[in-house]
Image (cartoon, rainbow, N blue to C red):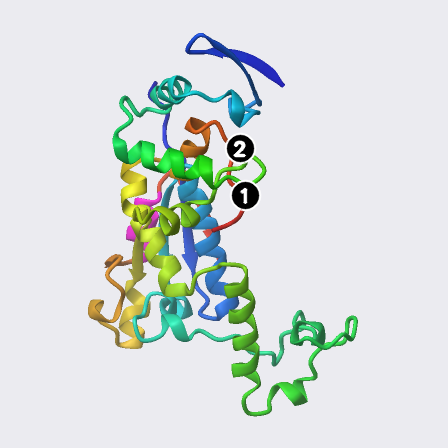
Amino acid sequence: MAEETRKMAFICSKGTLDMAYPALVMGWAALGNGIDVTIFFTFWGMDIIRKSRQDHLEIAPVGNTSMKMSMMGIHADNAGIPNAIGVLPGMTALATKLMKDKMQALGVPPVSEYLQMLVDGGAKLYACKLSVDMMGLKKEDFVDGVIDIVTAADFIDMTEGAQIIFI
Amino acid sequence: MTTRMISGKTVQVNEEGFLLSPDEWTKEIAIEIAKEEGIPELTPAHWKVIEWCRQNATNGRSPTLRQITAGTGISTKEMFALFPKGPAKKVAHIAGLGKPEGCV
């Protein structure tokens, strides 16, 4: 039975804590269903694979219209967090801590551990060459699971036939 | 709901072929389903995982992969080597349990 393996490729372009998880959760689910997974990290998404950054991703309440007071434990229906409060020192750290606590309570591993699980499950990770050059990074700055630094054209080549998800 | 005959025993299965009742499971059934899943022989390491999952199932559903690795001490890498292409789902199928529920 020569069934072709379904392939999925994720492009991670964001480096905030909330935007790191979609590829991790979906990639993990895909591996769990026997799907071939490739993840390409570009621009701010590079923070997910940077050793010095991956466990320090944050989420800011400023300008985040979806983050409501209720997420901070204050019952206020649809009331948002006023931007004037969001700019106060420590608000980003507070929002980040609340999100990390909630994830931990649900048994969701931190970014570094989750990413390693994907690598162990066979996911292939690549860093974007243009972003690497722009940010002055080197391969040593990335976690071991990163196979190579490649161009956008390389990525397009290696994901032929894959379903591509941009995050 | 349909029934099918596995290793000389008639069991109830869902549309994906998962056993509906873990009580109907036997080791012979596990060996048969493993073959269908592309695992020709179940080694002691396979059995360790299968038995652990049967003991730790909730409402007939098999544990998630992360729960299995944490509970058995078998690494994620080894799990993908033992049960290639979707370890938790394959173990659930072989162990006569429902698919795991949960995103990790």
Front residue of B87/B46: it is B46
For this orientation, the residue located farthest to the bottom is A89
x then y, percent, for residue A129: 28, 64
Count residues near mark 1 (Cα–Cα under 10 Å), then give few for <14, some for 14-19, many for 20+.
few
The answer for which chain carries disc 2 is B
Badge 2 element:
loop
Q: Is residue A41 visible?
A: no
Q: Is residue B103 magenta?
A: no
Q: Position of residue B3 (x, y in %)?
A: 57, 13
**For the residue carrying disc 2, how many other residues have a C-alpha within 10 Å: few (<14), some (14-19), or many (20+)?**
many
Q: Is residue A40 left or right of residue A21?
A: left
* Segment colored magenta: A152-159
Dividing the picture into quarters, in which one does residue A82 lie? bottom right
Residue highlighted by disc 1? B101
The residue singled out by tag 2 in the image is: B98
The answer to whether tags 2 and 1 share a subunit is yes
Q: For the residue marked with disc 2, what is the amino acid?
A: Gly
